[in-house]
Structures are given as structure tokens and as C-alpha cells.
Amino acid sequence: MTKKDTKLMFIAEIGLNHNGNFGLIFELIKQAAWSGADVAKFQLGWRSNKNEINSFTEEDIRYIFKCCENFEIQPMFSIFTQDALEIAKKFPFNYFKIASRTVKDDLELCKKILDQDKETFISLGMWDSEEPPFNSNDNIKYLWCKSNYPAYPWDLTELPKDFTNSIYYGLSDHSVGIDIPLMAVSRGAQVIEKHFTLDKSDTTIRDHALSATPQEFFQMVQIGSQIRKNLNIGV
């Protein structure tokens, strides 16, 4: 993907919104695909010890691949540990994700992930320097992010005014609603990552409240895609 691309990529960040009930994964992936998402994203190596909410086995990952294949949506994982990377290397992922926390805490792991030569999306919500953390590389796609959960409008005053003239290809969004992602699209963002849930009122983990429901995600994709088309013809 380059900045000359005209099609948006929408990533449904399912993350831990399965609540540890892996029976929900099928429906979450199904609804993400119905909503127009290009990618269904999970997290590997975060809160993943035995009996924790996000403890994936290799069999679980194979199941996710099968679900994604069935609904014609790409799977993606954020990689949080070296062990998680070793497991991920056993599967034919097209994409990887590096979370803001990993950029802050483990640059060596980030470099090992980038060495896999997969298209890699990197959130910079905890990166303080004005310079990017890694040298320019065709497989790196930086996402602007504010690592607040949720991120309120007054937290987002540094959202790029023009993504096309920045290091950022898109937005990893933690805001409530879909207005901020749509604003980012209008400013040239080509990738939108938005948390995805079946129930915003679920209090199992904090992410549900800042997530989009299937209907909201569908609206975001439809409106965002039209904004992109308008930009492409010079509106």
C-alpha cells in the first residue's frame, strides 16, 4: 500500500472483545465482514497466560483463520511477545500489527517482527519523538494513535491535519463514535483501525465502550469510502 492508493483499508480491532468466550469469535468475524471491514484483528501475547482472557492456542489461531477464510476477511494479530511471534510465524499472515505499548517497551521485538517482511502497521500512541522509531521501509505503515481509553475529542487536538504530508498512513482510533475516523479520512488517512464489538454496554473489559457496533462500523465504511472517492476526483 502506498500513499497513491485510492482504496481505504478498514481494520476491525476485535482484540479482547471476545471476553475470553471463543465461541463469540465466529460471530465477531462474521459481523466484521458484514460491516465492510477488510481485516479482523486480534492480539497475541497480551493477557495470554493460561486461564487469562486472551489465551490463544495454535488450534485457536487455526480456527480464526478458518473463520476469516469463510467470511472472506483477512486475519491480523498484534504481536506482543517473542513467544507470540514464534507462534505467528507458523501461519500465513499477510499483515502484522505492532501496538503502541510494544514500540515503547520492546524495540528489539519490533525489529524482529519487521524482519518477517510482512506489511506491518505500527501505532505510535506512546512514541514521544518527532522522528519515527524505524528507518523508512516499504513494509512499515505508521498509524497515528492516542493511547487513551477512550480518547475524548479534547485529547485529539494533535490529530494530523493532512495525513498525506505526514509519516502517518492512517489512524488507530480509540475515540467514541465514528466521527473522528471519518475526519481522518477527510484529511487523507488511508487506514482506519477501529475497535469492534457486538455490545458497547459490556463491561468485561474497557474496550467495548469505545468500540463500534456492526451498524456503526458499516456506516463508517460506507461514508468513509464515499469521502475517499470524492477526494480522488478533486472535490
Image: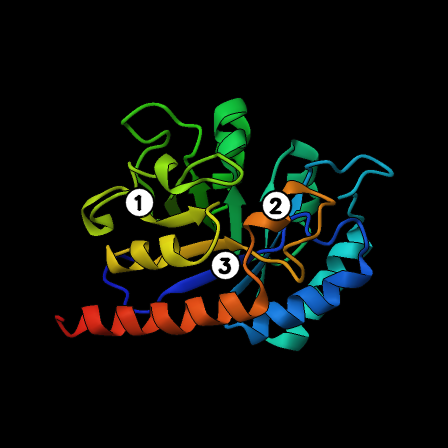
Q: Quadrant of the C terminus?
A: bottom left
Q: Residue at x 51, y 66 (%)?
A: 216
Tell me where residue 82 appears, x and y as whole percent.
65, 32
Q: Residue at x 58, y 44 (%)?
A: 78
Examine the rendering and report whether any part of residue 103 can be seen.
yes
> Quarter of the image holding residue 102?
top right
Q: Residue at x 35, y 37 (%)?
A: 154
Classify 156 as above or below 172.
Answer: above
Which secondary structure lies at badge 1? strand
Examine the rendering and report whether any part of residue 73 can be seen.
no
**Label 3 Cα crowd, 10 Å radius (few <14 / some 14-19 / many 20+):** many
Tell me where residue 88 appears, x and y as whole percent.
66, 47
> Quarter of the image holding residue 93?
bottom right
Left or right for 201, reference 223: right
Q: Give the residue pinned by disc 2.
A: 207
> Quarter of the image holding residue 127?
top left
Q: Amino acid at mark 3?
A: Ile
Foreground of the two, 143 or 147: 147
Q: Amino acid at mark 1?
A: Tyr
Label 1 to label 2: alpha-carbon separation: 23 Å
Which residue lies most toward the right here?
A: 51
Q: Which mark is residue 168?
A: 1
Q: Give the residue pinned by disc 3.
A: 11
Classify 42 as above or below 74.
Answer: above
Left or right for 125, reference 74: left
Q: Amino acid at mark 2?
A: Asp
